[in-house]
Amino acid sequence: MAVDPKFTVLLDVYGNILTEKERTMLDYYYNDDLSLREISDNENAERRERRSSGEQPVRENDTITRQGVRDTIKRAEAKLLSMEEKLGLVQKRNEMLGMLADIRKNAEKAAVRAYQSRAPKEIITAASDIDTLAEKMEELLQ
């Protein structure tokens, strides 16, 4: 499977709607860059550990295959895409980041022009304050 980096952002934004298993597998796949086989091996080792510690009853065929991991990842990706289609939070976030970059660029231009034209200090300070606020908003959206 080809790794699509947009799912890392979607996982950050909508990850809480997924089951723990789906979230964990997507995290392994996208953030830890593990293969389907490595995820399967990790999941099976965790299941064996839970069974041996008595947390989980022993069941026959209680393993997950690479295909099972792939199916879980595809199902979770579909949920994330569906949420983005319905809510559009990532798209809105990206649009806001673009607008904030424009605000910062224009605030910098305004501050430079105000300084060059010997405008009152309040104007220069206001332009600088706008840039600082826009920077803080960008940090919140990251």
Image (cartoon, helix red, strand yellow):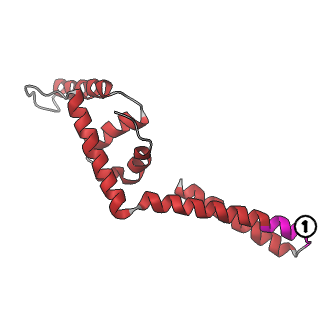
What is the magenta segment's predominant secondary structure?
Answer: helix
Left or right side of 59 for 134: right
**Residue type highlighted by circle 1:** Gln
> Counting other residues with Cα less than 10 Å from the Cα at mark 1, is it few (<14), some (14-19), or many (20 or more)?
few
Is 116 covered by the magenta stretch?
Answer: yes
Is 22 covered by the magenta stretch?
Answer: no
Q: At 57% from the left edge and 59% from the top edge, which residue is drawn?
A: 97
Left or right side of 122 for 81: left
- Image: 11 above or below 39: below
Q: At 25% from the left edge and 47% from the top edge, which residue is drawn?
A: 19
Give coordinates of residue 54: x percent, y percent: 15, 29
104, 46: nearer the viewer: 104
Q: At 42% from the left edge and 36% from the top edge, which residue is drawn?
A: 31
Give coordinates of residue 55: x percent, y percent: 17, 32
Give coordinates of residue 38: x percent, y percent: 32, 24
* Image quarter of residue 51: top left
125, 118: nearer the viewer: 118
Q: At 20% from the left edge and 24% from the top edge, which residue is drawn?
A: 48
105, 38: nearer the viewer: 105
14, 3: nearer the viewer: 3
For label 1, the residue is 116
Q: Which residues are magenta?
A: 110-118
Q: Is residue 41 visible?
A: yes
Give coordinates of residue 130: x percent, y percent: 70, 68
Q: Is residue 20 visible?
A: no
For the view shown, which residue lies furthest in the left direction? 60
* Image quarter of residue 111: bottom right
Q: Quadrant of the N terminus?
A: top left
Left or right side of 28 for 71: left
Left or right side of 53 for 120: right
